[in-house]
Image (spheres, grey):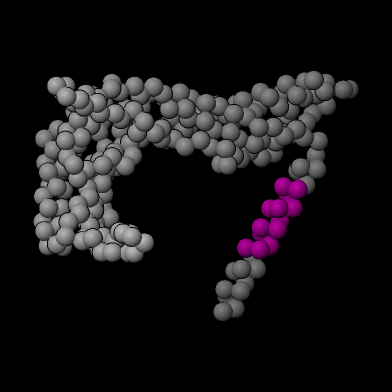
Amino acid sequence: MRTIKKTVCFVLIAFIGLANAIAAELQLPHVTVYGTATTEVVPDQLHWIIRVKIQGPELEDVAKQHAKAVESVLVLLQSLKIDKSAIQTSQMEFGENWEYRSSSRVRAGYISSTIISFKILDLDLYTKIWLALAKMSSVSVENVTYDHSKRIQYQNQTREKAVVAAQEKAGAMAKALGASIGEPLFVEEDLVTEMPWSSNAVNNLRAVAGEGQQDQAESLSPGTIPVKVRVRASFRLVSNQK
C-alpha cells in the first residue's frame, strides 16, 4: 500500500512540475494561432449496412424464413466476389411483434432481424448490389458510407499541413508586429472541429420501377471526402528590435 501511495505521489509531483513548466513557458511573449488544412480524397471503398427483417404469426416459421433470407443475401454477396472477411452478421434477434389497434396494444405475431455489414472495393458493384437487394422484400439498406483504404495516411498528411499552416499564420502575425517567431511552445489537435471521415452515400440510392420498365438505379457519383484537421499552436515571440 505504501509503495502505491509513493508511486501516486511521484506521478502527481511530476505532473505538477510539467504543468508549472508549461505555465512558465506561456508567460514568455508568444503568439497562439489555429491552423487548418483540408485534403479532398476520392473514396475507393463503400461500407454497407443492411437489415434482414421477417414478420409472421408463428415464431418457428419466422425463424425459418429469416434463416433463408440471410442465406440468400450471403450467397448474393459471395456471387459478386466480395471477400468473406469483409462480410459480418450481427445483432441477430427475434421477439414478439406488438401493434396498436383501437387504442389497444395487441400482439401481431413475431419479428426477427439481423444486421449484415460488408465492404466493397470495386465501386462498379454498387448498381448490381442495389438492384439485387431491391428485389428482396425482407431487406432494407440502413446506411452506405464512402471510405478510403489509405485513410490514416491522408489524415496524417493533413495534420502536417495544418501544423505548417499554423506556423505560417503565426509568422505573419509576428511580422506585422515587427517581430518573428521562435520555437514552438505547444501544439495540439482540435478534435472538436474534426470532421467525420466517412461520407454518407445512402442518398445516392434510388430504385425506379414502373409498369413495363426494368428496375434502374442512378449512377454512383462518389465525389470526394473532405479530410479536415485543425490544430492549435503557440510559438515564442521574438522581438526584432535592437
Q: Main secondary structure of the magenta part?
A: helix
Residue sitting at the far front: 102
Residue located 29% across and 28% down the image? 206
Residue located 48% across and 25% down the image? 39
Residue 79 covered by magenta stretch: no
Query: Compared with residue 50, is residue 41 higher up or lower down, i.e. above or below?
Result: above
Q: Is residue 182 visible?
A: yes
- The answer to which quarter of the image holds residue 238 is top right
Residue located 61% across and 25% down the image? 165
Report x, y in % for residue 210.
Answer: 20, 25
Report x, y in % for residue 139.
Answer: 22, 43
Q: How many marks?
A: 0
Report x, y in % for residue 47.
Answer: 31, 37
Left or right side of 167 for 73: left
- The answer to which quarter of the image holds residue 235 is top right
Where are the magenta residues, as a range? Answer: 11-23
- The answer to which quarter of the image holds residue 95 is bottom left
Residue sitting at the far bottom: 1
For the residue pair 104 and 47, the one nearer the viewer reads as 104
